[in-house]
Image (spheres, rainbow, N blue to C red):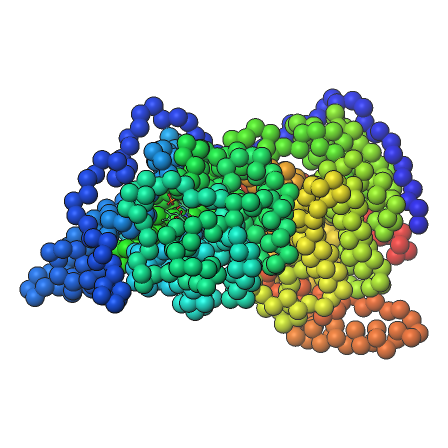
Amino acid sequence: MEGDIKSRGLFDSDRGRSRVSFVSVFSVLCGFQQATTFTASTTVFKSKARKEGHSYSSLAGPAGQTSLKERLSPPGIPNRQLEGEAFPGIPKFPTPLSAMAMVCLSDFEDYAKKYLPKIAWDYFSAGADDCTTRDENILAYKRIRFRPRMLRDVSMMDIRTKILGSEISFPVGIAPTGFHQLAWPDGEKSTARDPPNAFVSDSFPMKMFLIPVQAARAMNTCYIASTYSTCTLEEISAAAPGGLRWFQLYIHRNRAASQQLVQRAEALGFRGLVLTADLPYTGKRRDDVRNGFRLPPHMKVKNLEGAFEGGDCSEYGLPPNSLDPSVTWNDIYWLRSLTRLPIIIKGILTREDAELAVRHGVQGIIVSNHGGRQLDEGPATIDALVEVVEAVRGRVEVYVDGGIRKGSDVLKALALGAKCVFIGRPALWGLAYKGEEGLQDVLRILQDEFRLSMALAGGEPSSRDSEEQPGAMSLAGVSCLVTGAGGFLGQRIVRLLLEEEEPLAEVRLLDKAFSDEALGRFEKFKGKTEVKILEGDIRDVTFLHRACQGVSLVIHTASLIDTLGLIEKKLLWEVNVTGTRLLLEACVRCNVQHFVYTSTIEVTGPNCKGDPIFNGDEDTAYESTSKFPYAQSKRLAEDSVLKADGQVLKDGGTLMTCALRSMYIFGEGCPFLQGHLDKCLLNKNVYLRFSRKEALVNPVYVGNIAWAHLQAAKALRAPQKAKHVRGKFYYISDDTPHMSYADLNYELTKELGFGIEPQLPMPLTALYYFSLLLELVSFLLRPFVRYIPSTNRHLVTLLNTPFTFSYRKAQQDFGYAPRYTWEEAKQGTGKWIASVIPQRRLHLQSSTA
Ligand SMILES: Cc1cc2nc3c(=O)[nH]c(=O)nc-3n(C[C@H](O)[C@H](O)[C@H](O)COP(=O)(O)O)c2cc1C
Ligand SMILES: CCCCCCC(=O)C(=O)O
């Protein structure tokens, strides 16, 4: 059907716009500035002379099998002390080796430096040439300063994050490093074992930050296993089945060997493929040259055993020149043809390469300079991060490694846009200290420091950009299409868009038809923004195509709402599901980048068992069994919207979407409130009680849910926020007190002298079976007459199940905060109800006469 597009420039004057100023609840966490003095406490690389060290030969015993105690026990200290045994009569701690002595990561460094064989230490600590970049990685962090914020309730902080869809306990993973057996006999098996066995921190002062027990105990992090591991991939994955592992690949001249490695890793359950891009040749590490670095005979690059001919393993365990220096960007396509694993490229330092990485379809970027071991005098990674994050604009995840030695370094990296950081050498020092336990200690200290820094800085780095980047959270100059613009919510969204302090370029209002009242209301909010009215059908592809042309943001509220089963399922599907999918397709064709979908709490429930939820959130597990057509149609539509996130637009851009699951919406113009009011007027000004008092829900005021749409749209446009928001759904409630639906009607109007029935018309169970009976009657009559009962089981459950949700995640991720208080919402709505009473009475009189 051809849509009738009435495109009129409604408003041409900009006077009289009301002022909207948004004061973000979450604001800048971190900025950075140059420090005037360097405190350079990291002198370990330069000034500390080594006192003693093992000789290289002590690593390999007669049969290449020296025991752990022999290998790591420092001269003069009995081996048993390493196992925590006390000398007879001497207390177990403090000793220089007890975990209590290890306070920060440099303690582990000191330990490793002191007790590792010199050749191993030198290999681990090596940087290329003068080690300028290696040291700069650390110094650059010291030049960055926080702008701490106060009084922001940091009593509960959730430090979990997700990388490529997998949750990790805090944003630190283990970078790929070679030859872990040089640090600990079990080598990479110990490293792999660590993350899933991680800990719950009980060290002071972290108790006060403990997040809910289940989350804390199930801690996990990501380990990237190197091609140059001294254990096989099979051994590594068997050591910690189920742990989150990625595999790091160097491409060798023997491509078949590389291909086989990739496929082995995928089959073994590694969940990401990290291609290291910065090592076509090995950088010049002077100490390795001086030491004539070779692996001891009992250690091998086990994953590549047999891949190369000849016994010369003089270049880091493999024959010289076995790496392929001819690798190019096109090899990403080759890798893509070998595996379905997400590809993460490691070693990116410039915006140009970041753009190429995105264009070649990688899923993640690790900003890295290989710990300063490759090109010397390139940038510190934390400095390069800023440039890469800007270039990537939220299209793929960005991580960083190099120089992270403190929890506050992690916070800085996150504040500057990294999704997660990786540690290289510190993990090796932990291993050298006590194998997997030592690595756990390193992670625990880093985690505690991170949490403490975050609390002291005043909150989460994800929220840093709202004040920091002027314009980042704005719709200035945007062309926006609002579907369902003539509806109760749509109208309010349009009003807020037109009231934006920084005007949009254009707002297109799409609906099947607009009432004159609605058009009149829009007129009131006229401003600088051009407004176009588009009347047509959401199922009309041509109409949608024209509506989306030249638009960069779509707010899709159009939907048929049906709690009674009044609407034919086919029509409900066509509008709610097919209409949404057609609109998404039109967005892809017309290069619309941002899409906000109005979903509903009914997508979640309540389910037919009436399982309650109190103060739930996006992570609350719930069996959503409702087959009610409206709920189902919204669930499918929401699913399509969230799955569309990341779709490539016709011009090569990316579609970014999110969905807002709205609570029941009340406010001026609410059709449901009007329906209840009519019944109340007919019942001698007493509201019917259709929900029991205990069935607490938290409805949302229309001004607040409309505001959430604008906030979500702004967040999708701001790269720092978009990465958190894209592809996600959010519950949107506000500070309306929790009460039953029936009590809401009463609360809004009690000042007008209305009352409410004290009880349900019959006990809840009876009401439920009565509804079932009516449904049966309706079913039996269907061949003869269409009878829609006034109640049904779904409605009884919906109205009588406690179901409340917090808006905390929306607040965290995109700074949503209700714009109107409950008092304001109540007053505005109450006034509106009062204003419509006379005309409703007249209407009722005439229709009952
Ligand atoms: C001893 C050592 C071995 C390394 N081996 C690898 C490797 O096999 N593959 C790789 O991609 N990066 C390797 N790297 C680089 C690390 O993945 C990481 O980029 C670097 O260590 C981060 O710096 P940091 O040590 O300051 O944390 C190695 C680094 C070190 C120190
Ligand atoms: C021939 C390349 C050897 C690399 C060994 C591991 C590594 O990346 C490193 O930096 O060391």
Q: Residue furthest front?
A: 310
Q: Position of residue 659 (x, y in %)?
A: 66, 50
Percent x, y for residue 719? 59, 38
Residue at 33 percent of width and 53 percent of height: 294
Indicate the quadrant where residue 8 lies: top right
Residue 546 visible from this viewpoint:
yes
| Residue reaching furthest to the left | 89
Does residue 131 appear to the left or right of 699 in the view shown? left
Q: Against 812, is 783 above or below?
A: below
Does residue 169 lie above or below 515 as drawn?
A: below
Q: Residue at x 86, y 69 (%)?
A: 787
Q: Residue 767, relative to residue 542: is it above or below? A: below
Rendering coords of residue 213 (x, y %)? 41, 61
Query: Is residue 197 visible from the viewing direction of this image?
Result: no
Q: Nearer the viewer, residue 480 or 845?
A: 480
Q: Residue at x 70, y 49 (%)?
A: 647
Q: Nearer the viewer, residue 222 or 46?
A: 46
